[in-house]
Amino acid sequence: MSTSEFTVNKFMEFLSKRKIMAAKCKKCGTVNLPPRPICKKCRGSELEWVELNGKGKLVTFSVVYVPPTPLVAEGYGREKPYAFGVVDLGQDAKITARLTGFDVEKPESIRLGVNVEAEFLERNGRVILAFKPA
Ligand SMILES: [Zn+2]
């Protein structure tokens, strides 16, 4: 039975303390994000927690248009539209997160490769990871 601590649940626990933690492979140095018990590159199981500084580059994004209805998903209520992006935090660590501070009404204004930094949003008592222009 697996008793690995390198789980997404643990990641979320760190996130609630405003830390972005990843599982770094002791064998090959790959930073696994989201954390996983087995290294994605070399399948090694010797991992250690490392804290990322939250600075990265925008790799790709998509804009989500929320229909005007009061029955909206928890955490994303009454804002429209919003954007999600993939951010490269270096050392092979990429994560999908909400984007803030970009003009999502003009997606063509969002440049791939721009520097972004982490921001921690609080919604309904939960901390949500987002990235804004650095
Ligand atoms: Zn590895």
Image (spheres, helix red, strand yellow):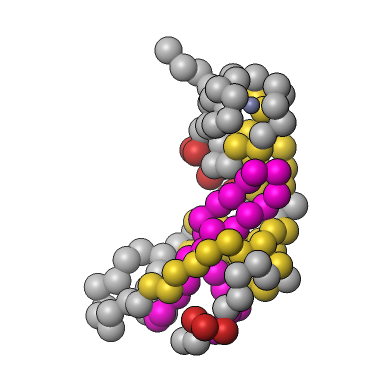
Quick check: 28 above or below 11? above
Who's the residue at 50% across and 38% down the image? 8
Q: Is residue 117 left or right of residue 43?
A: right
Boundaries of the magenta span: 80-103
Quick check: 90 above or below 44? below
Quadrant showing the N terminus: top left
Viewer-nearest residue: 40 or 130: 40
Q: Is residue 76 left or right of residue 96?
A: left
Who's the residue at 60% across and 37% down the image? 32
Spot the residue most to the top.
Answer: 1
Whether residue 82 appears in magenta in the rendering, the answer is: yes
Spot the residue most to the bottom.
Answer: 106
Please provide percent x and percent y for residue 89: 67, 52
Whether residue 101 appears in magenta in the rendering, the answer is: yes
Q: Can you tell me which quadrant of the image ligand 1 is in?
A: top right
Asked if residue 9 can be seen in this view, the reply is yes
Please provide percent x and percent y for residue 48: 69, 28
Quadrant showing the C terminus: bottom right
Asked if residue 49 can be seen in this view, the reply is no
Viewer-nearest residue: 70 or 46: 46
Who's the residue at 72% across and 58% down the image? 55
